[in-house]
């Protein structure tokens, strides 16, 4: 399970050092994809494969499902951490997430999210009340 907030920096070669506590779990490779809210999602390969399998069962006659699957597949890059736990963040992903040198990696239960530090700070401020007032139907029975 991925939990916590970490503040790595992108180096001059656009490499991100993954949090040390997760490196063993991610050593076999990760899938970096566009996430929601202009963040990047970093999935362990097995978790991404499970999600992809479920998505492949969606009806391609549904335009929204088709668009989501296309965007997810086209916006995903497989990476293998090097000996120091670094992965390279490609130009399209850096642009999508508006990444600068300062980043935030947050645990999102079964995957990690990568945010530009300023974007994460703004998102956190904007959505603090949503967290405090969580009563959405999608969370029913969990809170």
Image (tube, rainbow, N blue to C red):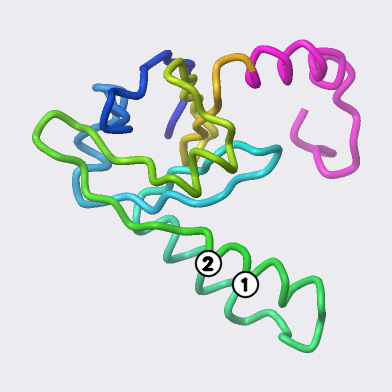
Q: Is residue 116 above or below residue 96?
A: above
Residue 8, position as x, y percentages in the image: 37, 17
Residue 122 covered by magenta stretch: yes
Residue 94, position as x, y percentages in the image: 49, 38
Q: In the image, what residue occupies the spot 62% across and 82% down?
A: 57
Q: Is residue 87 above or below residue 84?
A: below
* Tag 2 and tag 1, C-beta contact below 8 Å: yes
Q: In the image, what residue occupies the spot 42% across and 15% down?
A: 6
Q: Main secondary structure of the magenta part?
A: helix
Closer to the camera in the image, 136 or 104: 104
Residue 129 appears in which quarter of the rendering? top right
Residue 50, position as x, y percentages in the image: 47, 65
Closer to the camera in the image, 101 or 47: 101
**Magenta highlight range:** 119-143
Q: In the image, what residue occupies the spot 47% across and 41% down?
A: 111
Label disc, if present, on residue 74 of the rendered structure: 2
Q: In the image, what residue occupies the spot 20% across and 42% down?
A: 81
Residue 61, position as x, y percentages in the image: 79, 88
């Amino acid at each position: 399970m991925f939990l916590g907030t970490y503040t790595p920096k992108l180096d001059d070669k656009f490499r991100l050092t993954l949090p040390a506590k997760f490196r063993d779990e991610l050593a076999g490779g990760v899938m970096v994809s566009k996430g929601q809210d202009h963040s990047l999602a970093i999935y362990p390969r097995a978790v991404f494969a499970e999600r992809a399998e479920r998505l492949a069962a969606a009806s391609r006659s549904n335009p929204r499902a088709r668009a989501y699957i296309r965007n997810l597949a086209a916006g995903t890059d497989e990476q293998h951490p090097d000996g120091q736990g670094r992965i390279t963040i490609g130009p399209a992903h850096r642009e999508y997430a508006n990444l600068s040198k300062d980043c935030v990696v947050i645990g999102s239960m079964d995957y990690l999210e990568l945010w530009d530090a300023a974007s994460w700070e703004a998102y956190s401020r904007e959505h603090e009340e949503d967290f405090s007032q969580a009563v959405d139907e999608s969370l029913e029975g969990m809170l």
